[in-house]
Image (cartoon, grey):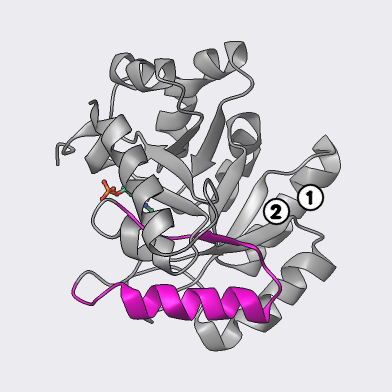
Amino acid sequence: MSSLEKVKKEIEDAEIVFGKKQGVTKLIAVSKTKPMDQIKKVIDKGQVHFGENRVQEALSKWELVKGNRRDLKIHLLGPLQTNKVKKVFSIFDYIHSLDRLSLAEKLSRETQERGYCPKIFVQVNTGKEEQKSGIFPENLNKFINSSRKTYDLDVIGLMCIPPLNEKSEQHFSLLRDLANDNGLKELSMGMSADYKIAIKYDSTFIRVGTAIFGEREK
Ligand SMILES: *Cc1c(COP(=O)(O)O)cnc(C)c1O
């Protein structure tokens, strides 16, 4: 079994164990830092969703491939600088890192110009870590309202990256509650180390890199 197939099997098993509907968990294969020849093997196995952290890297890797394969979905997982918004629209189908109103405004303007918008997750700083981006839980309702009403963005869900030294479980539980409070259906949570727990808490998009592609070089 390839590592992709192993992960897919584990997802199926977790859905059964935790009583979820089969197939609700979508797998994003996080291909950041990995070369296209390695990624192509995963594409050939039928994988559709891919995640990247850096806009420039994603453009150089995916522009050609995606031109021929419109069905592939590319997700931006890393922070987004306001001056890169135009580039983002040309390649990404999903943005997981909306974390400030100045970015919402920029995305909104670009949406009006182009007539379409990537699907958006608001990143939540569930651990309130200073070095991490994301909206603090107590400010989230207001932020989502502005993103939707003032800027008319297609906000579909919430994303979090739990603190390294804490159990993910409490953060996944909090993110699920916050999504419910705001009527949001999608949850972007769970990575190689904790995606099964994320499935327990109703994650709909898990982001798995290492378990599929192997360790990344530092
Ligand atoms: C790199 C990355 C992942 C994948 O992490 P793995 O531990 O390799 O599965 C998921 N989400 C984000 C935001 C990342 O930056």
Residue 105 lies, in percent from the top left, at 72, 59
Give me the residue at 31% from left, 31% from top. 5
Q: Is residue 130 visible?
A: no
| For residue 115, side relative to residue 57 (left or right) | right
Image quarter where the C terminus lies is top left
Give me the residue at 58% from left, 36% from top. 92
The image shows residue 125, relative to residue 7, as above or below, that is below
Give me the residue at 78% from left, 66% from top. 148
Of 178 and 216, which appears nearest the observer? Answer: 178
Which residue was labeled with disc 2? Answer: 106
Instruction: Give yes or no for contact between labels 2 and 1 (Cβ–Cβ under 8 Å).
Output: yes
Give me the residue at 52% from left, 49% from top. 22
The image shows residue 107, relative to residue 39, as above or below, that is below
| For residue 206, side relative to residue 5 (left or right) | right
Which picture quadrant has residue 90? top right
Q: Tell me, yes or no, whether the highlighted magenta stretch contains residue 170.
A: yes
Dot 2: element: helix
Which picture quadrant has residue 160? bottom left
Question: Hey, what amino acid is under mark 1?
Answer: Arg
Q: Which residues are magenta?
A: 165-191
Residue 139 lies, in percent from the top left, at 59, 85
Which residue was labeled with disc 1? Answer: 109
